[in-house]
Image: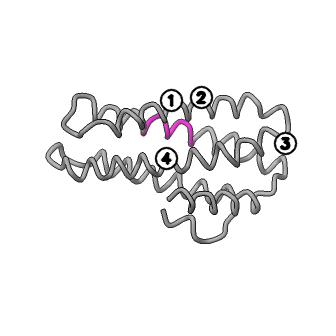
Amino acid sequence: MTTANKPQDAITLLTAQHREVHAMFEKFENMTDRAKVSKKKLADEICQALIMHTTIEEEILYPAVREATEETEDMVDEAVVEHASAKDLIAQIQEMDPGDDLYDAKVKVLGELVDHHVEEEEEEMFPKMKELKLDLKALGEEMAARARELQ
């Protein structure tokens, strides 16, 4: 992903990653059943992007949000559970081929799960992070550095 190169605050970084992965899911939706090789390649890219994204959130962002105040605990717990569901689907998709039963359905459900998760982060967690005056620049730099390591 190109977003890891320029310094930016945590919210800008994560929002850019959210948009990139959303665009990949849309591209997948528009592929024909005959485009098996392209579908597999794109689905694998989506999975890799999500693994990187969930890792930087879990290692860096969530602990910072959790540490800031007890009132974010439920919000972070829910996000962690959503990540677990996504990781389960990612693992299944990575083991499959586009011709397999339920392949497209699993990618579609993963996309829906991610859309829901993104909506909650952007509408609830990100405003809370601003309100708590977390050092978004430092978090962004740390997450970008970790993202580069993972790629």
Location of residue 38 with respect to 120 vertically, above or below? below
Q: Is residue 35 magenta?
A: no
Mark 1 vs 3, N-terminal side:
3
Q: Is residue 148 left or right of residue 138?
A: left
Q: Position of residue 27 (x, y in %)?
A: 32, 52
Q: Which mark identifies residue 69?
A: none
Mark 3 vs 2, N-terminal side:
3
Q: Residues within 10 Å of mark 2 (few under 14, many from 20)?
A: few
Q: Position of residue 16 (x, y in %)?
A: 55, 58
Q: Which residue is mark 4?
A: 50
Q: Which residue is mark 3?
A: 68
Q: Which mark identifies residue 81?
A: 2
Give the magenta-colored segment's residue range: 111-118
C-alpha gap between disc 1 and disc 3: 26 Å
Q: Position of residue 53 (x, y in %)?
A: 55, 49
Amino acid type for the residue under numbered disc 2: Val
Residue at position x 56%, y 42% from top? Answer: 118
